[in-house]
Amino acid sequence: MNAELRPNLVALNTIIHREVRRFMRIWPQTLLPPAISMVLYFVIFGNLIGRQIGDMNGYSYMEYIAPGLIMMSVITNAYGNVVSSFFGSKFQRSIEELMVSPVSPHTILIGFAMGGVLRGLAVGFIVTLLSLFFTDLQVHHLGVTLLVVLLTAMIFSLAGFVNAVFARSFDDISIIPTFVLTPLTYLGGVFYSISLLPPFWQTVSLANPVLHMVSAFRYGILGISDIHIGIAIGFMLIATAVLYVSCIRLLVSGRGMRQ
């Protein structure tokens, strides 16, 4: 094996293993709360309110919101894992040891991002299992479903990394999730179809990145979407590439990481 490749593979495996152990060790704080929250969403929005709303785009309201709730859990957990973990490494000054080591910036970034992706997928899988107690989900396009959930988890893992780099205190890592991520998620078509909105607001909604992800995932599960699936996937691929390059540049420059 290449002399330069081996240490990077060892470092990558170590970072991913540490990230997985981190959120699994405290599973009552990382995996259980989002599962409980999603059950409440299913009961309150899907069951109680859904009875009054009726069908939406040919599906019961419970079936319609299930993909959106799964995607919402993936987004928040992928983002939250990376922003908290990387900022913790900054706060403890352990990230400086990684940066002065012969480990590639790509290895560091992929390791932290994969931790977020795996936590997002783990919570998404749990929520999917719980959703089966409330509705019968049948995947229409497995390839699209897997691609969208992986891209979404990666995008928000990388976004969490950016937030962690610029954060200067633990309070800073909650600003973006509270004032940006939460509004985008609730306005991203999780609980409604944008076809219900006036034409102007339908156009404005297209600027919401979460809408593309939720719609594409709903297409994979139910076979319906508010946005052309090719446009949605193309947007996610571009977003992943732009965020990845931006994160690598931040790592190379050491901005916000070296004291």
Image (spheres, rainbow, N blue to C red):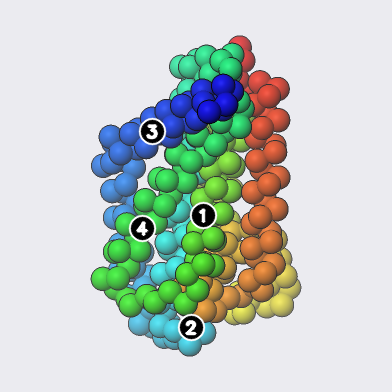
Counting residues from the start of the chain, the first of labels 3 and 2 encountered is 3
Residue type, numbered disc 4:
Phe
> Mark 1 and 2 residues: CB-CB less than 8 Å, in contact?
no
- Tags 4 and 2 in contact by the CB under 8 Å rule? no
Residue at 45 percent of width and 53 percent of height: 74
In the picture of the structure, the residue carrying the numbered disc 4 is: 125
Could you say whether the residue bearing mark 2 is in a helix, strand or loop?
Answer: strand
Contact check, label 4 and label 3, Cβ < 8 Å: no
How far apart are labels 3 and 2 at the CA level?
42 Å
Q: Is residue 232 left or right of residue 141?
A: right
Reading the image, the residue beneath label 3 is 17
Amino acid type of the residue that numbered disc 1 sits on in the rendered structure: Leu
In this picture, is 207 found above or below 86? below
Residue tagged 2: 56
Amino acid type at mark 3: His
How far, Cα to Cα, is label 4 from label 3? 19 Å
Foreground pick, 87 / 100: 100
- For discs 1 and 2, the disc positioned in front in the rendered view: 1
Residue 164 on image: x %, y %: 56, 31
Dot 1 and dot 4 residues touching (CB under 8 Å):
no
- Residue 128, relative to residue 34: is it above or below? below
Q: Is residue 219 rendered to the left or right of residue 122?
A: right
**Distance (Cα) linking label 1 and label 4:** 12 Å
Judge the density around disc 1: few (<14), some (14-19), many (≥20) Cα neighbours within 10 Å.
some
Residue 23 is situated, as x and y percent measured from the top left of the image, at 35, 37
In the displayed orientation, state which residue is furthest to the front.
Answer: 1
Going from the N terminus, do you reach mark 1 or mark 4 first?
4
